[in-house]
Image (spheres, rainbow, N blue to C red):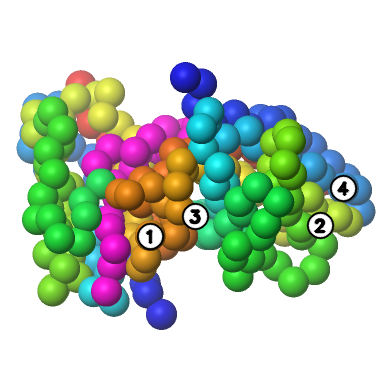
């Protein structure tokens, strides 16, 4: 059973470009969460999605950031017009139910975005 | 607003020592608490999860305790090994939502 798969693992963008990060949850998991880890900072919740629905986006920056989890295919975190401050590691996590009975999440290896 | 604090920020010990990592949280109304391990440039590996109704969990050389009323958890590592060197993260959830609030982590170095 493959774990949470994220790609690309590393992404370099110039200021003003778009970044798209993809996450395939574990098999049988229908809940996806995105977290961001800024340099020298802790992990911060961004958004929680189920298939075709955004459940909680309270941690998403108001502008330039969007997320989706379509009926088919991976979840995508999209950052438009990237700035240097967007440079960070973006982690995806999944769970089989709403946090599963124990609330346990399974994390991917992360996508590391560098904005030049 | 829930805040999670981990002390110390960094720790260096010789191989074989038993050690304790501390985690505190400001709001005792948690659903569960998880300890993770993160290796440099890697993702998070779940080590132990303690439900709010539980007092402790054990896995191999690891033991995590939870005192909800005082807002504290400890991760005990017995007979530390160089392979235990990593950053250890503590995280709590308020409800069964998967919305974790993380501490800043404790970076552990175990010297051979």
Q: CA distance from mark 1 to mark 3?
A: 19 Å
| Side of A109 relative to A19 (left or right) | left
- SS label for mark 1: loop
Secondary-structure class at tag 3: strand
Q: Are marks 4 and 3 in contact (CB under 8 Å)?
A: no
Question: Residue at point 45% right, 53% down?
Answer: A98
- Alpha-carbon span between mark 4 and mark 2: 10 Å
Magenta-colored span: B29-48
Instruction: First in sequence, mark 3 or 2: give its number.
Output: 3
Quarter containing the N terminus of chain B: bottom left
Asked whether disc 4 touches disc 2, contact meaning CB atoms under 8 Å apart, the reply is no
How packed mark 3 is, by other alpha carbons closer than 10 Å (few <14, some 14-19, many 20 or more), is many
Q: Mark 4 or 2 closer to N-term?
A: 4
Q: Which residue is mark 2?
A: A83
Q: What residue is shown with label 1?
A: B96
Q: Nearer the viewer, mark 4 or mark 1?
A: 1
- Tag 1–tag 3 contact (CB < 8 Å): no
| As drawn, B14 above or below A47 | above
Q: Nearer the viewer, mark 3 or mark 2?
A: 3
Identify which residue, B58 or A114, lies in the foreground: B58
Q: Are marks 1 and 2 in contact (CB under 8 Å)?
A: no
The residue tagged 3 is: A43
Crowdedness of circle 2 by 10 Å Cα count: few (<14), some, many (20+)? some
Magenta stretch: includes residue A115:
no
Furthest toward the right, the residue is: A16
Q: Is residue B96 visible?
A: yes
Q: Which mark is residue A18?
A: 4
């Amino acid at each position: 059973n493959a774990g949470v798969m994220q790609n690309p693992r590393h992404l370099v963008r110039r200021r003003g470009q778009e970044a798209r990060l993809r996450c395939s949850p574990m098999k049988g998991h229908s809940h996806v969460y995105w977290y961001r880890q800024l340099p020298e900072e802790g992990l911060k919740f961004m958004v929680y999605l189920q298939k075709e629905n955004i459940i909680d986006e309270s941690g998403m920056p108001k502008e330039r950031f969007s997320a989706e989890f379509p009926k088919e295919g991976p979840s995508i975190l999209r950052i438009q017009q990237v700035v240097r401050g967007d440079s960070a590691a973006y982690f995806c996590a999944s769970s089989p139910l709403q946090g599963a009975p124990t609330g346990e999440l399974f994390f991917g290896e992360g996508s590391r975005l560098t904005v030049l | 607003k829930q805040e999670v604090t981990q002390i110390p920020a960094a720790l260096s010990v010789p191989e074989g020592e038993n050690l304790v990592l501390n985690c505190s949280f400001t709001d005792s109304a948690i659903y569960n608490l998880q300890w993770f391990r993160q290796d440099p440039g890697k993702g998070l590996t779940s080590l132990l999860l303690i439900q709010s109704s539980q007092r402790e969990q054990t896995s191999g050389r690891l033991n995590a305790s939870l005192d909800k009323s005082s807002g504290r958890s400890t991760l005990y590592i017995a007979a530390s090994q160089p392979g235990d060197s990593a950053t250890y993260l503590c995280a709590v959830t308020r409800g069964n939502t998967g919305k974790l609030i993380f501490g800043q982590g404790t970076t552990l170095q175990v010297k051979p």
